[in-house]
Structures are given as C-alpha cells and as structure tokens.
Image (cartoon, rainbow, N blue to C red):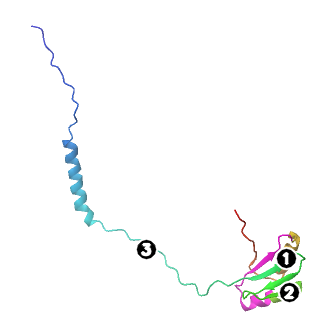
C-alpha cells in the first residue's frame, strides 16, 4: 500500500486568543496603577511687578533743512540749536536718568547729519540713544 502523506491544510486564520489575554492583563495593570500616580507639578519662577511703567522717550527731530527740534513725551515740540539740544537733553536726563532719547530724521536727511547729532549726544554722556524708524509696508 502506498504510503499516504498527511495532507497539511493551509491555516488562513490567526489565533488571537493569546493577544486578547495579554491586552486584558495590561489593561488591568494600567487601571490599578493609574490612580496611584501623582500628577507632576512644575514650580514656575515668579517675578515682581515693575515699579514704574516704561518712560516715554525724548525725540530729537532732524528736518529736511537740517533744523533741529526736541519733542517731549507730552508732545510739546520746540526748535533748538545744537548747544540747546545737548543742554536740554542732559537736563531732562538728570530729572529722569532712565529716559531714552530717539533721533527721528527725515528720510532725505544725509546720514552724516544724523551721525553728528549722535556724536554730540554721546560726547555729552547722554545715555540710551537710538534711532526712530517707520516700519515699511509689505
């Protein structure tokens, strides 16, 4: 009698019972340990309130004809000479040492004129000098 080989059937199904068992065990472990975990707390740094609001700057205006003017934070504008400019700005900064000074020049003013005013203010030990610009349209 010819020997018959045992025919093997292709198995087209996966036995998922072991995977379900593992999933249920993990679910039980997470359900038991979740209430025991304390939520983490972050200690954030604290800052104090600013003692005073920022000081509005003094504005040095350089017009197209190289005339100078000084505008107070209140909006009062006054024509000045170079000597008066240095004296007035120094006087304002002795009253309030944290008050910045910004230079606002017409766009047609030569760069040299702006640098001369910055140099004058620097020689007079005026602190916090900057340039005021208008943002361009995009």
Seen from the viewer's position, the closer of residues 73 and 98 is 73
Of helix, strand and loop, which one carries label 1?
Answer: helix
Looking at the image, which residue is at 75% across and 90% down? 94
Q: Tell me the crowding category of disc 3: few under 14, some 14 to 19, or many 20 or more residues within 10 angstroms, Cα based.
A: few
**Rendered location of residue 6, percent (x, y):** 15, 19
Q: Tell me the crowding category of disc 2: few under 14, some 14 to 19, or many 20 or more residues within 10 angstroms, Cα based.
A: few
**Rendered location of residue 2, percent (x, y):** 12, 8
Seen from the viewer's position, the closer of residues 65 and 49 is 65
Q: Which residue is mark 2?
A: 79
Sequence-wise, which precedes: disc 2 or disc 3?
Answer: 3
Image quarter hosting the C terminus: bottom right
The vertical placement of 19 against 94, above or below, is above
Of helix, strand and loop, which one carries label 3?
Answer: loop
Q: Which residue is mark 1?
A: 119
Image quarter hosting the N terminus: top left
Boundaries of the magenta span: 89-108
In the image, residue 126 lies in the stretch drawn in magenta = no
State how far apart marks 3 and 1 are (Cα).
48 Å
Q: Tell me the crowding category of disc 1: few under 14, some 14 to 19, or many 20 or more residues within 10 angstroms, Cα based.
A: few
Q: Which residue is mark 3?
A: 43
Looking at the image, which residue is at 72% across and 88% down? 74
């Amino acid at each position: 009698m010819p020997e018959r080989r045992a025919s093997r059937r292709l198995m087209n199904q996966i036995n998922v019972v072991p995977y379900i068992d593992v999933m249920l065990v993990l679910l039980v472990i997470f359900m038991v340990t979740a209430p025991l975990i304390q939520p983490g707390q972050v200690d954030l740094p604290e800052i104090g309130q600013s003692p005073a609001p920022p000081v509005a700057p003094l504005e040095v205006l350089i017009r197209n004809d190289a005339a100078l003017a000084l505008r107070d934070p209140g909006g009062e504008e006054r024509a000045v000479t170079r000597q008066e400019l240095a004296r007035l700005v120094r006087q304002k900064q002795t009253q309030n040492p944290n008050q910045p000074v910004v230079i606002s020049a017409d766009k047609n003013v030569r760069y040299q004129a702006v640098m001369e005013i910055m140099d004058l203010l620097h020689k007079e030990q005026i602190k916090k000098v900057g340039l005021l610009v208008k943002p361009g349209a995009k």
